[in-house]
Image (cartoon, rainbow, N blue to C red):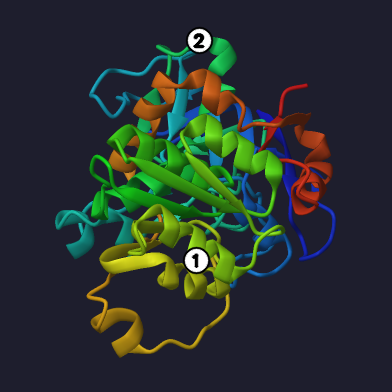
Amino acid sequence: MKTQTQVLTAFKTPLEAREFDLLPLADGEVLVKVTCAGVCGSDLHMASGEDPRTPLPIILGHEGVGEIAEIRGEKADVDGRPLTVGQPVLWNRGVVCGRCFFCTHGQPHLCPERFVYGIHRGCDVPPHVNGCYSQYLPLDARTDIFAIDDVPPDHHKTLVTASCSGSTAAHAFDFFEPTEDETVVVQGVGPLGCFMVALARDCGAGRIVAIDLTEARLQLAQRFGATHTLNIKETSAEERREAVRDLTDGRGADAVYEAVGKAAAVREGLGLVRHGGRYVAAGFGQPGGAMEWDPFADLVRPDLKYVGVWVSHTRHTRRALELMKRRLADFAQMITHTMPLSEADAAHDLMRRGEAMKVALEPHE
């Protein structure tokens, strides 16, 4: 059996259409027919050579939903229910060993053997097809799989962001969940930030301030629950700081969640938090620059709780899915374009120009 793919062979060059022979499955492995692959901002960074982890050549794509085409032996979903051919599924993007210190101490996302489809394994690593920019994708036997047959078929595509931005946002809220009437700021309301807004609303936050430079994204953030918006193009950093202070009797926000991945955003965000507040940085999927900071003034004297969030794991994907299932119509708005897999380069260009929030690629035209 063969599969058509889009392959990154060199940085800053067009993807190449390539056909691969699919290897026979090993016991416990699952072959999925990819019905939708999400284009993530990380894909763009990798294609541009900004992510030092990227092996070449590689099939990009770590966000995917699909249908089971083949199962070797027996395989159950995350709830222990046997999976069957033809069943619609979503899978956790990361695969871990399950044996190391981190896997056995509640931090599997830090597993030193962890790999992510479409990020860590190039085409030279069997089974060679290791990313979602493909008609078919073989899933390692250790992959955690979610059955999504309780979701209407026209919304399967809606769920494509669950295991990446949704899961990372859920991980961020593991550390600090806003309580009723607290004020939250979300810096950057792309997919990750919109999930953060939705989670803050789900937690009952009183005021949710969304900051971005795109009006369309700010409007979508309002749909997810933002009560106030600040457009970077229309305000200065000082004006944004004063706006947050005005909402909080001069204190600053109780919690600020960063979803930008740039050091400059962190530098500004630290000035938006009240004394005793929380700052959660989750937007760095790759290096995003450096900044100067004063440990006394920025961390110790304000008694700030500052946390970095690295990726996610299965329980976070579960929380993201549960949230999405309650708000399918809203999350469907996140996918602004749907294109065939053969137009993956055009999809990348749309996102680079800021004309798309999220592009969904459909491998089967």
In which quadrant will I find the N terminus?
top right
Look at the picture and state if 254 lies above or below 263: above
- The amino acid pointed to by label 2 is Pro
Task: State which tag comes first along the sequence, 2 or 1.
Answer: 2
Can residue 160 be seen at all in this image of the molecule? no
Q: Which residue is drawn at 66% across and 70% down?
A: 50
- The amino acid pointed to by label 1 is Arg
Look at the picture and state if 242 lies above or below 2: below
Q: Which mark is residue 152?
A: 2
Secondary element under disc 2, as helix, strand or loop, is loop
**Circle 1 residue:** 241
Can residue 270 be seen at all in this image of the molecule? yes
Secondary element under disc 1, as helix, strand or loop, is helix
248 relative to 152 in the view: left or right = left
- Can you give x and y, in whole percent of width and height, for residue 138 in the image? 52, 36
Whole-angstrom CA distance, mark 2 to mark 1, is: 43 Å
Please state which of residues 160 and 350 is positioned toward the viewer in this rendering. Answer: 350
- In front: mark 2 or mark 1? 1
Please state which of residues 108 and 301 is positioned toward the viewer in this rendering. Answer: 301
